[in-house]
């Protein structure tokens, strides 16, 4: 196995859920090199890929599909904050989460929808609706495995800012 491929494989194993551009930056490799070696590792069943929110996240085969999805979302600052808050406080109403985290309700709704679809969160059937973690123990085990990268956090903060500019005045927490 080539030295570059070994470096890519090792980086993915040490950084579960790392996405393509982060591998490129972290290892200072050209786009073609990363594409080539990731494809060879995937074809050789040495790594797994999970596509979440328009990004391909790469993993060691030790992680099952649910863990891969959850780790991919934990790499995103806002999703991570929602998950951590629900873990710490238990079932919470979406509006309360938005207010506590200082994010627009529309941003909260978008993340909640994705996290419910990924089987990370569950919505209650009764009113007022509350959110809770679908698998609290399993989720908690993954917290220490991953933290969002600086570029991920910057993109997330930019999207929050843009989203808050278009939030309806009635939904803003400062009114």
Image (cartoon, grey):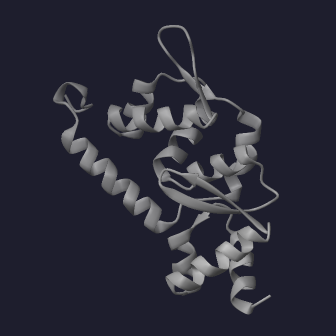
Quadrant of the snapshot with the C terminus: top left
Q: Which residue ends up furthest to the bottom in the rendered image?
A: 3
What is the number of callouts on the image? Answer: 0
Q: Who is closer to the viewer here, 57 or 149?
A: 57
Quadrant of the snapshot with the N terminus: bottom right
Could one spot residue 53 in this view of the protein? Answer: yes
Q: Identify whether 26 is placed above or below 128.
A: below
Q: Quadrant of residue 96?
A: top left
Q: Identify whether 35 is placed above or below 173.
A: below
**Which residue sits at x=53%, y=8%?**
126
Q: Identify whether 160 is placed above or below 8.
A: above
**Which residue sits at x=58%, y=77%?**
35
Residue 35 vs residue 107: left or right?
right
**Which residue sits at x=58%, y=85%?**
33
**Which residue sits at x=64%, y=60%?**
17
Q: Quadrant of residue 137?
A: top right
Q: Who is closer to the viewer here, 26 or 19?
A: 19
Q: List x then y, in percent, for residue 110.
A: 41, 36
Residue 16 vs residue 125: left or right?
right
Residue 38 vs residue 127: left or right?
right
Q: List x then y, in percent, for residue 66.
A: 71, 43
Q: List x then y, in percent, for residue 124.
A: 57, 16
Q: Who is closer to the viewer here, 81 or 22?
A: 22
Could one spot residue 13 in this view of the protein? Answer: no
Q: Identify whether 131 is placed above or below 104.
A: above
Q: List x then y, in percent, for residue 73.
A: 57, 49
């Amino acid at each position: 196995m080539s030295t570059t491929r070994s470096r890519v494989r090792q980086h993915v194993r040490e950084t579960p859920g790392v996405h393509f551009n982060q591998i490129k930056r972290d290892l200072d490799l050209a786009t073609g090199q990363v594409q080539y070696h990731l494809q060879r590792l995937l074809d050789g069943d040495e790594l797994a890929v999970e596509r979440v929110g328009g990004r391909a996240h790469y993993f060691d085969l030790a992680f099952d599909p649910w863990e891969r999805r959850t780790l991919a979302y934990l790499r995103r600052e806002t999703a991570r904050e929602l998950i951590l808050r629900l873990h710490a406080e238990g079932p919470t109403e979406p509006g309360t989460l938005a207010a506590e985290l200082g994010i627009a309700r529309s941003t909260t709704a978008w993340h909640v929808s994705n996290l419910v679809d990924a089987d990370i969160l569950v919505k209650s059937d009764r009113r007022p609706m509350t959110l809770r973690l679908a698998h609290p123990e399993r989720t908690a085990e993954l917290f220490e495995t991953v933290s969002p990268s600086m570029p991920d956090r910057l993109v997330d903060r930019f999207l929050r800012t843009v989203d808050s500019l278009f939030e309806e005045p009635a939904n803003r927490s400062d009114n």
